[in-house]
Amino acid sequence: MPEPEVQYTESSGVRIAYQVFGDGPFDIIYAPSHVTHIELVWKVRPWAEFLRRLSKLGRVIVFDKRGTGMSDRSVGLPDMEERTDDIRAVMDAAGSERAALIGTSEGGTMCALFAATFPERCWSLVLWGSLPRLKFARDYRGGFTEEELGDGDAWLDEHPWGDRERMDSQAEWMLPRGTPSERQALVNMLLAGADDKSMRALNEMNREMDVRPALPAISAPTLVSCWAEEPPHITYGSRSFAELIPGAIFVELPGKGHLPFGSDDARAFAHLEEFLRRSWEGTPGVPEFDRVLTTLLFTDVVGSTDKAVELGDRAWLSLLERHHAAVRLLLARYAGVEVNTSGDGFFARFDGPARAIRCADEITKAVRSLGIEVRAGLHTGECEVIDGNVGGIAVHIGARVASQAGPGEVLVSQTVKDLIAGSGIRLQDRGPSELKGVPGEWQLYRVVEAAA
């Protein structure tokens, strides 16, 4: 098979490089680990062989993540939400309505978030050597503690991207059974795919990511797999994925090598192939999804009754019309969907939490010119979809979060905070709160800066 042509599409103003090759009854998206260069991966023999074998199963779509490889490089700190948008942009450009998503390492985290947010676009999901979170937490004991992570920049100063020792270690981890020439080809690809500045930005995003809140919303058949001799934080992360994704199958294969083709054990590909074929045979022709991961935004005017009395009915209705027009303009700008409007309040949903926060922040600023203040609250959760409307406990939580906000304030739940790693949005801890009618304490955060 000749090396495929590199093509480009645009995602939120960023050019994304991708390739399409192979033929078959279904589409496959392969989202690799942190860094690639889609021309040079074909020089890494085990990687090229893996892609060629995939192309015999179906039509394969590969891409360089934003900030790496042949995609636009100067894009600032990467954002997991934007990166999942890049998957959608590449699928649209390739004419793929639905695909099986295979993700390795950080690519698996992206694919999991995509599958939860856009279930209609994903008919099967494979997560290989991936993890939902990097840091230790009371409910995630396989992550790195702050002491273990230390000062990431200090470590990178000692071992910058391109440092011989670091690159040799990387190649040994990813291709432990590779020949010296294969490992050198891998190092060449990695160095062409990113520079030291890009790697620092990627590390910063990965330190803060946590997609666990999204995982119960995944409805696609899911295979979670890793090599048994992977580092403990990856085997722990893989098991966590399998525990949190409904119906997921977990398989730990004997051997080592971070990538699916890191070991020369043919059982790995045979296992993946069997899972994809079985999932495809069980895929309905016209899928229907009644649950989806979404970010919910609630706003309302502060002191609306007093303002209505002060202005009188006619002036108040005129003010509300201008308020509604301003909110709807911003919802359109940030790809929000208006679900309901009640009096002076709005209920909208978004397929990404960072966009929702930026929209809410701009709404609070825009309406001040009208002489009013609004409060806003956001929560991300799994919702029931009923005739285009959304329902479920996540809706009640979102409304209760909004009720805790003060004039001109945007509050978000812990779930939203966990999903915006790399966005540049700054939050301030408001501490635990009790939400009326919702069990337990809820950690809320105030938006300090919603970086554009």
Image (cartoon, grey):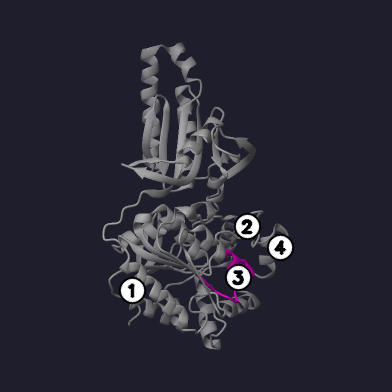
Residue 300 point in image, percent of width and height: 46, 28
Going by the numbered disc 1, the residue's amino acid type is Glu
Give the residue at mark 4.
148
Are the residues flagged by discs 4 and 3 in contact, CB closer than 8 Å? no
Going by the numbered disc 4, the residue's amino acid type is Glu
Q: Nearer the viewer, mark 1 or mark 2?
A: 2
Q: Earlier in the sequence, mark 1 or mark 2?
A: 1
- The CA distance from mark 4 to mark 3 is 20 Å
Are the residues flagged by discs 3 and 1 in contact, CB closer than 8 Å? no
Depth order, front residue of 86/232: 232
Q: Nearer the viewer, mark 1 or mark 4?
A: 4
Determine whether the residue tagged by mark 4 lies in a helix, strand or loop. Answer: helix
- The CA distance from mark 2 to mark 4 is 15 Å
Are the residues flagged by discs 1 and 4 in contact, CB closer than 8 Å? no
**Range drawn in magenta:** 225-237
Q: Earlier in the sequence, mark 2 or mark 4?
A: 2
Q: Nearer the viewer, mark 2 or mark 4?
A: 2
